[in-house]
Image: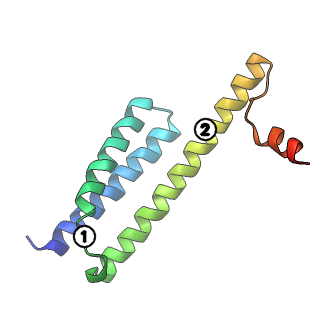
Amino acid sequence: MSETVKLKEALRQMLAVLESERQAIAGLDLDAITLAAREKLGVCDRLDHADAASLDEECRAMSRAARDANEVNRQMRNLVAANITARIDMLSGSPRLYGAKRYAALGA
C-alpha cells in the first residue's frame, strides 16, 4: 500500500472521528468525547509521519476539512464549558476568581 493511500485512509478516519466527536459534544456524552479524543490522538500519530510537501490535492482538501472540523469542535467545547461555568457560578452565588472581567477591572 502506497504512502498516499495510507495517508488518505488516515485522513478519512480523522474526518469520521471528528464527526463522531461533534455528535458526542452535541449530546454531552462524556464517554464518547473521551473515546473520540483517544482516537484522534491515535490517528494523529499515524499522520505525524506524512510528508506535507508530497500531499496531493485530495489530501490537502481532506486536511483542511479536518482542521476546520476540529476548530468547530473546539468552539463547541468552549461554549459548553462557558455555559457550565455560568450555571455553576449562578448556583454558587459567586463569580469566578480568575474571570477576565476581574482582570480587566484591575487593569483599568
Viewer-proximal residue, 34 or 25?
A: 34
Kindly state the secondary structure of the residue where label 1 is placed.
loop
Residue under the image location 35 percent in, 58 percent down: 15
Percent of width and height locating residue 102: 82, 38
The numbered mark, 2 or 1, whose residue comes first in the sequence reads 1
Residue under the image location 40 percent in, 52 percent down: 18
Residue under the image location 53 percent in, 50 percent down: 74
**Disc 2 target residue:** 80
Kindly state the secondary structure of the residue where label 2 is placed.
helix
Percent of width and height locating residue 23: 45, 43
Percent of width and height locating residue 100: 77, 43
> Dot 2, how many residues are within 10 Å of its Cα: few (below 14), some (14-19), or many (20+)?
some
Give residue 6's mark: none
Give residue 50's mark: 1
Percent of width and height locating residue 61: 38, 75
Residue occupying the far top of the picture: 92
Viewer-proximal residue, 107 or 48?
A: 107
> Quadrant where the N terminus lies?
bottom left
Q: In the rendered picture of this protein, how many numbered marks are placed on residues?
A: 2
Q: What residue type is disc 1 on?
A: Ala
User: Measured along the vertical axis of the image, is residue 50 above or below residue 55?
Assistant: above
Q: Coloring scheme of the render?
A: rainbow
Q: Is residue 57 left or right of residue 78?
A: left
Q: Is residue 73 left or right of residue 47?
A: right
Residue occupying the far front of the picture: 107
